[in-house]
Amino acid sequence: MSKRLRPLVLVFCGWITLIMMLFVPIGGGGVSLILVLSVPILVVMGVLFGVSYWYLDKKSNNKTLKTVIFYIMIIVLLGLAFMYYPY
């Protein structure tokens, strides 16, 4: 994957909850309040992870470290999105 695409993938993973809304039904009542709270948090986390990875990419020359940090950020974003999705 190109180094320009990786920060965009991190930002996209922050928006994955909104994409899941199209395919997975949401529970009614108070359960949908979790969605209202989790979407902005995940979007902000995705943007912060994208910016911090972009900065890390500019400053570091260690390719292995950058790859490991990228995959950890992806796992955190996707894990939180699936864990807090109200279905």
Image (cartoon, rainbow, N blue to C red):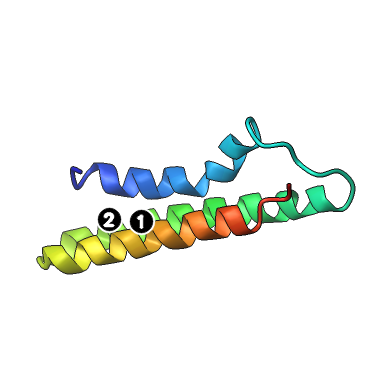
Classify residue 70 by image quadrant: bottom left
Across and down, in percent, residue 27 comes to: 81, 44
Residue sitting at x 36%, y 44% = 9
Q: Residue furthest left?
A: 61
Amino acid residing under circle 2? Trp
Q: Is residue 37 left or right of residue 74?
A: right
Q: Is residue 4 above or below residue 61?
A: above
Across and down, in percent, residue 72 comes to: 36, 65
Pick whichever, 83 or 58, lies toward us. Answer: 83
Q: Residues within 10 Å of mark 1 (few under 14, many from 20)?
A: some
Across and down, in percent, residue 85 comes to: 66, 51
Q: Residue furthest right?
A: 29
Mark 2 lies on a secondary structure that is helix
Q: Residues within 10 Å of mark 2 (few under 14, many from 20)?
A: some
Circle count: 2
Do tag 2 and tag 1 residues touch (Cβ < 8 Å)? Answer: yes
Across and down, in percent, residue 77 comes to: 48, 57
Residue sitting at x 73%, y 36% = 25
Mark 1 lies on a secondary structure that is helix
Q: Which residue is mark 2?
A: 54
Pick whichever, 1 or 61, lies toward us. Answer: 1
Q: Is residue 25 left or right of residue 15?
A: right
Distance Cα–Cα, label 2 vs label 1: 5 Å
Q: What's the mark number on residue 4? A: none
Q: Quadrant of the N terminus?
A: top left
Classify residue 58 by image quadrant: bottom left
Amino acid residing under circle 1? Val
Q: Is residue 37 left or right of residue 44?
A: right
Residue sitting at x 28%, y 48% = 6
Q: Which residue is mark 1?
A: 51
Residue sitting at x 61%, y 59% = 83
Q: Is residue 14 left or right of residue 49?
A: right
